Image: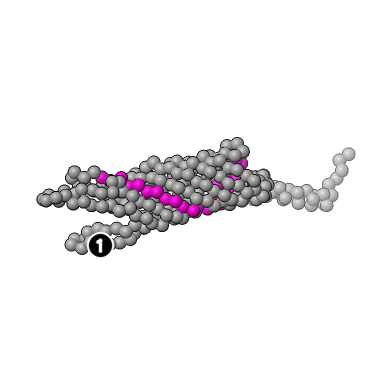
Amino acid sequence: MTTPRTDARRRKRIGYDRALGRGRHPHVAAWRRTALAALVAVQALAGPAAAAGADDRAKRHVSFGVLAGSAQPVRALADYQWDVRPHAAWGAEVLAGSGPWSVGVRGWRSGTTQGLGLAGVPDPAVRTTSFELVSRARLARWRNVELEALASGGRLAVVWEPGQLLVDTGGGSPVTVTLSAVHEWVAGTGVTLGLPLGRDWKWSIETERRWYALDTAHRDGATVVLARPTFGDWDARTALTRRWDW
């Protein structure tokens, strides 16, 4: 014999159906099921990350990384006959930190050329070398992939090679033009994606935008205009880093 359903049982069943999103509004039900699935997924991903973060907070570490990539001057430097295509760059970095935070120093070197458009005078190479303080902070981790933000600031040296040029004036002795080295402050920000390789090694790729100012002079009719605009470069790097914990 089938037990008759009472009003209390019907009310309980209706409440159960509504909790699962069943009933007269299928679009509401689908939204609730999607939200529930997203919540479960976030909890599943956040759990291991939170545990890893708690474990990392107890770790102090130092690291040494070898950097290689490219540096591309901003397009505004083309107005001064700089070659603004990407050029090879390389450097190294030493960091010390605790948990997701680290600070250290970085050396970074690249170069390009500057066209002079003078007959019989070779275009000089432009070498850029910077030594900067670097700060890094891990923003997120998904499985083994880490997302970091970075900020940098330091000194930049711009050197022309050769530093002296002989310019033919068309009559009389050639004139020696000296291209003096320039030293300026430089600052940048960027992001990094890192992938651990075993326990102590990490491979990463990053991009950074840097800014620096240069004194310039150009002729406007019979007047020489002096200015100090802000330039910079875009850097793309890959790094292989060795880390030591204690």
Q: Which residues are magenta?
A: 123-149
Residue topped by disc 1: 225
Display colour scheme:
one colour
Q: Secondary structure at mark 1?
A: strand
Main secondary structure type of the part rendered in magenta: strand
Name which residue lies at 26% across and 45% down: 123
Residue 74: x %, y % from top left: 36, 51
Name which residue lies at 28% across and 46% down: 162
The N terminus, quarter of image: top right
One can see residue 31 in this view: no
Name which residue lies at 61% across and 41% down: 143
Which residue reaches farthest right?
1
Residue 205: x %, y % from top left: 49, 42
Residue 11: x %, y % from top left: 79, 52
Residue 16 horizontal side relative to residue 176, left or right: right
Kind of residue at disc 1: Val
Name which residue lies at 57% across and 49% down: 96
Q: Residues within 10 Å of mark 1 (few under 14, many from 20)?
A: few
Which residue reaches farthest top?
198
Against 227, residue 134 (above or below) is above
One can see residue 246 in this view: yes
Which residue reaches farthest left?
171
Against 146, residue 153 (above or below) is below
Residue 33 horizontal side relative to residue 188, left or right: right
Residue 63 horizontal side relative to residue 216, left or right: right
Residue 49 magenta-drawn?
no
Residue 219: x %, y % from top left: 22, 59
